[in-house]
Amino acid sequence: MRSPDLVLLHPPSIMDFRKRAVLLGPVSDLIPSTPVFEMYPIGFTTIASLLESKGFQVRIANIANKMLASERFDPERFVKSLDPALFGIDLHWLPHVQGSLELAKMVKKHHPETPIVMGGFSASYYHEEILKNHAEIDFVMRGDSTELPMEMLMDRLTSGRPLDAVPNLSWRSGEKLNINPLTNVPDDLDDVEVDYGLMVRKVFRYMDLDGHLPYKNWKSNPMSIALGVRGCTHNCVNCQGSCDSFARNFGRDKPAYRSPEKLAEDVAKAEEYLKGATFVVGDIRQAGRSYATKFLSELKQRKVKNEVVLELFTPADKEFAQEVARSTERFSVQMSPETHDEAVRKAQGKPYTNVGVEKSAEFFLDAGCNRFDLFYMIGLPKQTADSVADTVRYTEKLYEKFKGKRLYPFISPLAPFLDPGGNAFEYPEKHGFKVRARTLEDHLKLADKPSWKHVLNYETSWMTRDEIVDSTYTAGLGLNEIKRKMGLITEDVASGTRERIEAAMSLSSRIDSMVADGGPTEKDLESLKAETAHLSESTVCAKEELDWSESSYVASFPRIAWSLFRGR
Ligand code: B12
Ligand code: SF4
C-alpha cells in the first residue's frame, strides 16, 4: 500500500497520561471526550477531503483515542512505523499544549528529515513562540481555514518549490522566521466538505478504526457534526471564538457561513453513514432568520430521520420552535445561559433574561423537542461562590417548573484554561480576571501540575482558584441531590455520584497539602495514579446524561456496508 502523503496526528492533552497521576478534574464532563480530550478537530476531515480530491493521500491517526482504546498500543512504535512526506499535529485547544509538543518531539526523533506542521487556534495564536522555541516544529499553518493553504504546502513540498506564496504559513528558514500573510480567510464555507464516506473508506484503507474515531465513547453514543459557520457574531468575554477574537487573531471580520442548502445536505449525508445525532455548529439564526428558515425547509425536504441538535445563542420565539419541529423528525436544543444571575450573564457578554431562556425551553419542549439542555458555568466575571450556589437553587426551580418534561440543566467550571485571545485574556483587568499564564511556555508549566486547581490559568476578582474548585464540587453535590430528590436519578446513582465527588474533594485537598510541602514526590504520584484516573471522569454529572440517542454504531453497520458497496 502506498504511504500516505500527509499524516494528521491528534495527541492526548498529556502525552504520558497513562503513567502520570494528575487529577484532571471535571474539565470534560459536558463534552463527548474524556479528560484527555481525545476528540480531534473537525478540520482534520475537511483538510483530508480537499487534499484527497487533489490526489494526495491523507491518514488521520487519533493517537489519544488509540491510547485509550488499548493499553498495549505504543504511540512511539506507531509513529516510527509511519513514513509520510509531512506530519500534521493539531494544537487547536490549548489543553493539548503538553501532548502536542511531546508528540512533535517523538515524531522528530524517528523522522528527523520529515517536516512537521502544526495548526489550530492555539497554534495560530502562539505561532511565533512555537517556531522560536520548538525546533522540531517546522511550520505553523495559521487561521480558521487551512484547507487550501495545506494543499499549496503539500504541493510546494513535493515539488521543492519555495514557500513564500503559501498563505497563512509561518515557517523557519535557517534562523529566520517567515510569516506569510494571513490572507486565506474565505467569505463562505461552500468549498469545505466534511465527507463521512471518505472517513469510512479510510478506516478500511488503513485497517484502523480507533485511529479515526473522534472520541472513546463514540461507538455507544455516535455523533456527527455539521459545520455551518466559522466565526461568531457574539462576544462572550472568555471565548477565543468570539467576534473580536476572530478579527484579532484569525483575520476574520465577519463569520463565514455554509449555504443553507449545503448545510442541510451535510446533515442528510451524515445520516447515510450514521445512525445517531448530528450536531449543527453555531446558532442557525446567526446569519439571519431567513437563512434559518431556508435551512429548515431544505432539511424538511430531505426527510432526515437522525436527531438534529441545534444551538441557541439567544432566546427564541414560539414560531421558530414550531418551524424546527415541522422540519425535523427528531430534534434537541442546547443553550448556554451560563448563570441564573442576569448581571453576571451580561458581564459575560450575554445580555438576555431568564424569562427569555425559560420561554425558549417551553416553546421547544411543547413543540416536541427530545431534550433541551441548559449549560451553566463557574468562573464568570462578577460571579461569586454564593452566586454559583444560587444558580444551583435556581435549577431546582427549573426542574419543578418543567417537571415531566425533558429539560436538563448542567453546570461545569471554565477549565482548565481561560482562552488565550479572548477579550478576558487580552484585557483581564477590564473584565475582572487575573491571568496566571500568558505564554505557551507558561501554559506548558501549568500542564505539569498535579491537579486541575493548580492547572487553572486564571482567577477572577470574585473567585479564587480554591473557590472555583470548591464551588464546582459543591454545585455537583447540590445538583445530584436535587435530581435524587425529584426522582430523576436512582438512589444508587445518586450515592455513587456523591461518593465520587466527595472522594475528588478529599483527593484535591490532599494534593494541595503535598504541594504546600514542596511535593508531590514521584512516590506520591505513583500512589495517586489509580485514584486520579477514576476521579477525573463524570464527576459533576454522569456522562451518559448527555447522550443524545439510543443508537449505537452497531446500528450504523448496514449504512456503512451499503456506502462501501456503492463505493462512495
Ligand atoms: C464546535 C466546537 C467544539 C466541538 C468540537 C468540534 C470539533 N471536533 O472540532 C466540541 C463541542 C466537542 C468542543 C469541545 C471543546 N472545545 Co470547542 N469549540 C467549538 C466552536 C464552537 C467551533 C469550532 C469551529 O468552528 N471549528 C471549525 C474550524 C474553525 O476549526 P476546524 O475546522 O476544526 O480546524 C480548522 C483550523 O482550526 C485549522 N486546524 C485545526 N487543527 C489543525 C491541525 C493542523 C495540522 C492544521 C494544518 C490545521 C488545523 O485548520 C482546520 C481546517 O481549516 C469554537 C468556538 C468558535 N466560535 O470558534 C469552540 C472552541 C474552539 N472550543 C474551545 C474549547 C476550550 C473546547 C474544550 C477544551 C472545552 C472543554 N473544556 O470541554 C473542548 C475540547 C474537546 C476535545 N478536543 O476533546 C475553545 C478553544 C480555546 C483554546 N484555544 O483552547 C473555543 C475557541 C471556544 C470555547 N471557549 O468554547 N468544541
Ligand atoms: S461562547 Fe459566545 S462568543 Fe464563543 S462561540 Fe459561543 S456564542 Fe460565540
Image: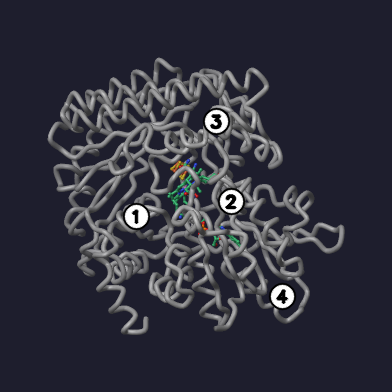
Mark 1 or mark 2, which has the lower sequence index? 2
Q: Are marks 4 and 3 in contact (CB under 8 Å)?
A: no
Q: Residue type at mark 2?
A: Phe
Instruction: Check the picture and name the quadrant holding the C terminus.
Output: bottom left
Mark 4 or mark 1, which has the lower sequence index? 4
Residue beneath disc 4: 157
Label 2 and label 4: CA atoms lie apart by 23 Å
Mark 3 or mark 2, which has the lower sequence index? 2
Residue beneath disc 1: 279
Mark 4 or mark 3, which has the lower sequence index? 4
Mark 2 or mark 4, which has the lower sequence index? 2
In this rendering, the answer to whether 465 lies above or below 11 is above
Residue beneath disc 2: 121
Label 3 and label 1: CA atoms lie apart by 31 Å
Q: Residue type at mark 1?
A: Phe
Taking depth in this image into account, of 442 and 380 the one nearest to the observer is: 442
* Ligand 1 within 8 Å, label 1 CB: yes
